[in-house]
Amino acid sequence: MKKRLYIIRHGETDLNKNGIVQGRGVDSDLNETGRAQGDAFFERYQHIAFDKLYTSKLKRTHQTVAKFIEKGLKWEQLEGLDELAWGKYEGMPSTPKLREDFKKLVEAWNLGHFDVRVEGGESPNEVYIRQAAAMQHIMQQNDEHTILICMHGRAIRLLLCQLLKKSLDKMDEFPHQNTSLYILDYDGKDYSIKTFNSLDHTHKND
């Protein structure tokens, strides 16, 4: 069964703005910029006949797509779409020590050590498992062909690797900004990217 997925990252929070680690364990609100980003996305894509909206359990995703929810679009929250848990890093400001620790963590992932995680956090392999369960649920819905998914930056990188059958060490090939959009088509067997990390909705003069 063919499907089209619109996958967006949530809008900006004050923690994003100030370089503070969020992750799955920090349920922050959007700031004024983030709400405006969500509104701009709605204005650009409200004409799309989405069959269903899926978000993570975290309110920054709910707030980003609030106007779609208010419009009456069917909505389901899945914990499989939550951000990677950053454990002891969550709520911490960016410091030289944290940046060095984070660099070492990413280097381990780039070397294929996908079970490595921050103390109290999740590994890429653990996120992969819950994302696989979420996507199995989404893709089994036979009456849903055009789907909007709002989730999180690192989680999007991991999900795109999974859907495109790439090793998780390729996750950094997929950049993201707040409310940036990836559109993927599913032909019944494979996924392909049709739109890569788009912020067209933020360009008011387009």
Image (spheres, rainbow, N blue to C red):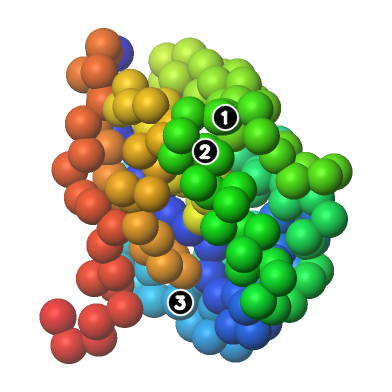
Q: Mark 1 vs mark 2: which is more N-terminal?
A: 2
Estimate the spatial distance between the alpha carbons at disc 2 and disc 3, rounded to whole Å. 31 Å
Viewport quadrant of the N terminus: top left
* Circles 1, 2 touching at the beta carbon (< 8 Å): yes
Q: Position of residue 39 (x, y in %)?
A: 46, 75
> SS class of the residue under badge 3?
helix
Q: Position of residue 135 (x, y in %)?
A: 51, 24
* Residue at (21, 31) in percent of width and height: 192
Q: Is residue 51 visible?
A: no
| Residue 64 position by quadrant | bottom right
Identify residue for label 1. Answer: 114
Of callouts 2 and 3, which one flags the residue occurring earlier in the amino acid sequence? 3
Q: Secondary structure at mark 1?
A: loop
Looking at the image, can residue 157 be seen?
yes
Q: Is residue 172 above or below residue 98?
A: above
Whether residue 139 is situated above or below residue 161 in the rendered picture: above
Assign a secondary structure to mark 2: helix
Asked if labels 3 and 2 touch by Cβ distance under 8 angstroms, the answer is no
Foreground label between 2 and 3: 2
Say which of 159 and 65 sits in front: 159
Residue named by callout 3:
37
Q: Residue at x 70, y 39 (%)?
A: 117
Q: Amino acid at mark 2?
A: Trp
Dot 2 alpha-carbon crowd within 10 angstroms: few under 14, some 14 to 19, many 20 or more: many
Q: Which residue is mark 2?
A: 109
| Whether residue 133 is situated above or below residue 160 in the rendered picture | above
Q: Pick the residue in front: 129 or 11.
A: 129
How many C-alpha atoms fall within 10 Å of the one at disc 3: few (<14), some, or many (≥20)?
A: many
